[in-house]
Image: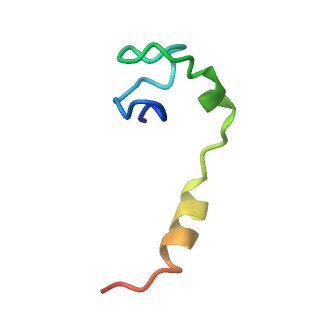
Amino acid sequence: MYCPFCGSGINPETTFCSSCGKNITFLRDVQKPSTSQAKAVRNTFPDH
């Protein structure tokens, strides 16, 4: 997972980014897609 403000790698369990200090608790509210949802999205793009 990456900080949306500075792009640094972050632990999703933390409250603030250790690089830029921004509050990242709102990221916990974002629902992660399930594996089947991710596969469905991947299958919509052709392999080249």
* Residue ranking furthest to the left: 48
In percent of width and height, residue 42 lies at 48, 71
Q: On screen, 32 above or below 38?
A: above
Q: On screen, 1 above or below 12?
A: below
Query: Closest to the observer: 32 or 35?
Result: 32
Residue at figure coordinates x 58%, y 63% from the top left: 36
Horizontal side of residue 46 vs 39, given as left or right: left
Here the colouring is rainbow
In percent of width and height, residue 4 lies at 48, 35
Q: Quadrant of the C terminus?
A: bottom left
Horizontal side of residue 47 vs 29, given as left or right: left
Query: Closest to the observer: 40 or 26?
Result: 26
Picture quarter containing residue 6? Answer: top left
Q: Quadrant of the N terminus?
A: top left
In percent of width and height, residue 41 lies at 55, 70
Query: Closest to the observer: 20 or 18?
Result: 20
Residue at figure coordinates x 38%, y 14% from the top left: 18
Residue at figure coordinates x 65%, y 27% from the top left: 26
Residue at figure coordinates x 42%, y 23% from the top left: 11
